[in-house]
Image: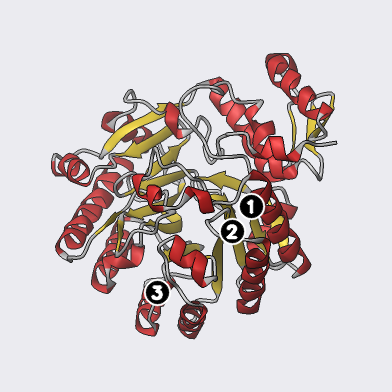
Amino acid sequence: MIDRLRLAQAAVPRYTSYPTAPHFGPAVNSKTVESWLSALTPNAKLSAYFHVPFCESMCFYCGCHTKVVRKREPINTYTEYLLKEIELVSEASGSHQLTEIHWGGGTPSMLGAENLRRVWEKLRTWFDLRRLAEHAMELDPRGLTPEFARLLAEIGVNRASLGVQDFNADVQKAIGRVQPLEVVQAAFAALRGAGISRINVDLIYGLPLQTIEHIQENVRQTVALSPDRVSVFGYAHVPWMKKHQRLIDEAALPDSGQRLDQADAVHAALVKAGYLAIGMDHYAKPYDTLSSAAEAQELHRNFQGYTTDSADALVGFGASAISTYAQGYAQNDPGLSTYQKRIEAGQLPIIRGHAFSADDKRRGALIEQLMCNFEVDVADGLAEFDASFNRLRQLQDEGLVVVDGSRVQMTQEGRPFVRLAAQAFDAYAGSGGRFSKAV
């Protein structure tokens, strides 16, 4: 019998990278990344992530690199440096196909229409966008107008992610994000009216004052809106990292057992509504490309979560953005002023990263396969992972996995705890930071 409550309380990385970000260091710098960019082959495919670290107000639950701004000047200045960074990257790498673009934050729409057009035109100048398959943006429904939705369509945005979190008014007040259902409905209408039909919704469980009834109502309202994908995340309460989270009343937070029940409830409701479970926290309609990739075992996992992105490198632009190259990870300076100073000096704004060892690559591939497909076969080199399999056999005794020779498969009951199985392959486990709960 699985002790689900005990397992749910375990702190473990989300494994959107391996090694995880706490293990990045200063050995990777601007010069390092210039060499990685110059090593790209002429036919290499790239994807781009743009981080916009601005919001009109701070949501209490937020765990992102962002700040509240009221004036246009810092936003316009930031745009200038994004444009310069695009040039620096292209000068180091040469012109390449850009197959995916993703905007995150913060609130990317805060750049405004004119600045977004300028970034789009700069990308068209320095990269080949003829095979751009997906151009996605994370959006706050509260600021989305029909006019702005049309602008997004004009610059090629074809997927939008709406941060909903919870529809209940009391919960919204407790997390500092008042957003009535009518606002979300209007955002859907604006996007679809502009021809942007691929829409994702983000929901969160484990928020203050949330109950099973709230969760079920959230799913009912979400299904009525008919998004293509739904991402469901457990609230990560990390006030030692994000001081604004101290505004949340900890006494109002669901306990571990309640969080587990909420996760179960949202999963059951979405599956009953016809969505396919993708990995540990994504759901998609059967026709969606994410579902097709999952069925073909071609899913990938990066800092944006589960994705169909198969580009040769992901280049992060903006303060705190993280890039992934064949040789390793690189993170931009998270400080706005220092990010800008580095670019002003003609340098890529890299502050830290991690160069892969052969062991990192092997373990990272195994962890990604397990996180995406709930199974992995170590095959050759099994002896190298004796310690990993000792831990996995303990998880087998607990009912989470089945170990058959070199093959590891999550049980149906063990799937929500896949991060614990992934940790068995993590050579850095037990060092480098504090993490959120497994569920």
Label number found at residue 281: 1
User: Which residue lies under the disc numbered 2?
Assistant: 231
For marks 1 and 2, the one nearer the N-term is 2
For marks 2 and 3, the one nearer the N-term is 3
Q: Residue 145 in the image: state x and y as whole percent.
A: 38, 81
Q: Residues within 10 Å of mark 3 (few under 14, many from 20)?
A: some
**Dot 2: element:** strand
**Residue located at (73% from left, 41% from top):** 374
Q: Amino acid at mark 1?
A: Asp
**Residue located at (43% from left, 73% from top):** 141
Give the image quarter of residue 367: top right
Image position of 50 (left or right of 356): left
Q: Nearer the viewer, residue 224 or 253?
A: 253
Give the image quarter of residue 421: top right
Residue 254 drawn above or below residue 168: above
Q: Nearer the viewer, residue 300 or 221?
A: 221
Q: Are marks 1 and 2 in contact (CB under 8 Å)?
A: yes
Q: Amino acid at mark 2?
A: Ser
Q: Residue 296 in the image: state x and y as whole percent.
A: 73, 52
**Residue located at (48% from left, 26% from top):** 356
**Residue located at (18% from left, 57% from top):** 80
**Dot 3: element:** helix
Q: Amino acid at mark 3?
A: Arg
For marks 3 and 1, the one nearer the N-term is 3
